[in-house]
Image (cartoon, grey):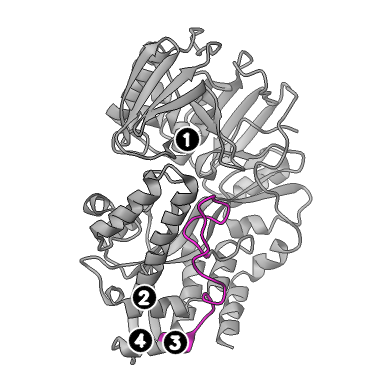
Amino acid sequence: MKKLVSLALAAVMVLSVSASAFAGEAKSANADPANTETSDETLVIALSAEPSGLWGAGVGKVENEMQIIGAPLLDTLVTADRNTGEILPNLASSWEWIDDTHCRFTLRDDVTMSDDTPLVADDVVYSVNTWIEFSGNTDTGRFLADASAEDEHTVTIGFNTVAPDFLSMMTWSNFGIVSEDEVNALGGPEAANTNPAFGSGKYRFKEWNHGSDIVLERNDNYWNPDYKGYFKEIKFIFTNDAAARAMAVQSGDVQVAYDMPMAMASTYVADDSVQVIAHTFGQNTRVWYNMGPNAGPTADIRVRQAIDKALDFDAIAMVGTAGFGEEVHGTFPAESKYYNEIFTKEERAVDIEGAKALLEEAGYGDGLDISIVGMQDQNPVFTVMQENLKQAGINLSIEIVDTPQFVEQANGGTYDIIHVGDLQDARYPTIFSSLRQAQIDTFCIGGCKYTTPEIEEMVDAVIQEPDEEKAKENAKTLEEYLKQEMMISNTYPEMHAAITGADIKGYRTMERGFLDATGFYK
């Protein structure tokens, strides 16, 4: 009955979207075959914000829109099949690991940069050195040590950590290759960031009308003959009003509305004039319990276990994904090669009496007050959690903040629980960062935890193991420990949603589920 009460609450909250969500099906990303035609048409994509530049790696900035618009301009050494995770050749035709921290890349000899000069190893060396110098505090540069050219088409990159899956990270758009001559011709990195006429990508920069739009033009001399860009131009426009982006697609003024709220996207599923795209992207959300220096009741494992027992993960997932996704039972995403099912569905079932017994034992039999910090888009999820916990005698106060406040409070540990995702689709050196002592001393969004050398060793064993099957076993060891200590409660997979015109095909993604603007066609 108590579970039904929670589900009823969730149903009320999503009443306006649930009927639409189940009236039809959303399309998945990366499902259509590759395009084979070209045209003189323009594709208009509506994003939620205008970026400050298009070459964040060159100036040490990280913005989602920057990655999406900048990616068509810059090719990476390697790329990935987004359905399988397989690493594929791109600017590098082959590669080999020399030792645990050095990889030698052989470059293609038929790639031309935007200034009509050939790609050479010195371009890669310059790019790597730029990342190290300007992006040393971001994921672009902080794991790189050096780069050296052996000849015009051979370059070795050194890493400062052992991480066999780092090549998966190098498929990210922020690892796009430029040449020093190109950047200098534009006036240096800062100037190139806002006037990025460089690279060897599928599209080239045409114009930036600040406050209005950014236009890219197809590179008809692109080195890879297997790629066909259907649209001659791609125009990006900007509005933070999601409803306005959706209506622009309905009217035909826009072909793609990106970064739509899941609940809003679900209301368009039954609309034949548009298509809804909904997909996961390798990131699960989790409840992180404050166990750090500023921890209150959640420092007690019995309180953490009680919260976990009281939460209705079915209802939370229903609201959090607008009915498109289900609760998750492991730390890695279900589609990952490293996925382990750590919880069963039976273990995830609501147990109010068990939660009450644990609270009584912990000295909170008369009730408990705790807080959760988050941003506006998760308020419906927090309301479900609030109702869940109330059944067990826990009063959850919800504090909605903006992004800077969220980062500040998460890092300072001035909360009891927090709900945020982290990327785990591969064994990047960044995974499980909140369990790292070095990260805790600097920046630990997701919750400052007490950690130990043993935890550090378990994390290293996941990231550094060269054999994938053994790495999966190592991940299970760590995940079982997280479960035993109830350090996190996994909830649901984070998802991206978009709305496109009914005749648009070729929705593809990059890292973190970002939109790949170069694959669309009719």
* Residue shown at the point (72%, 39%) measured from the top left: 32
Residue type (three-letter) at the residue carrying disc 4: Leu
Which residue is label 1 attached to? 172
As displayed, is residue 317 above or below residue 101?
below
- Say above or below: 89 vs 377: above
Q: In terms of depth relative to the viewer, which is nearer, 208 or 57?
A: 57
Between the C-alphas of marks 2 and 1, the distance is 36 Å
Please identify the dominant SS of the magenta region. loop
Point out the stretch of residues depicted in magenta: 329-355
The reply to whether dot 2 and dot 1 touch (C-beta < 8 Å) is no
Gap in angstroms between the C-alphas marked 3 and 4 = 9 Å
Circle 4 — which element? helix
Foreground disc of the pair 3, 4:
3
Residue 348 colored in magenta in the image: yes
Q: Which residue is mark 4?
A: 359
| Mark 1 Cα-neighbour bin, 10 Å: few <14, some 14–19, many ≥20 | many
Are circles 1 and 4 on residues that touch, CB within 8 Å? no
Q: Identify the residue position indicated by label 2 in the image.
A: 304
Could you say where residue 96 lies in the image, as x and y percent from the top left? Answer: 45, 26
Q: Is residue 207 visible?
A: no
Q: Real-space Cα distance between discs 3 and 1?
A: 45 Å
Q: Position of residue 134 (x, y in %)?
A: 30, 29
Q: Which is more N-terminal, label 1 or label 2?
A: 1
Rounded to the nearest angstrom, the CA distance separating label 3 from label 2 is: 12 Å
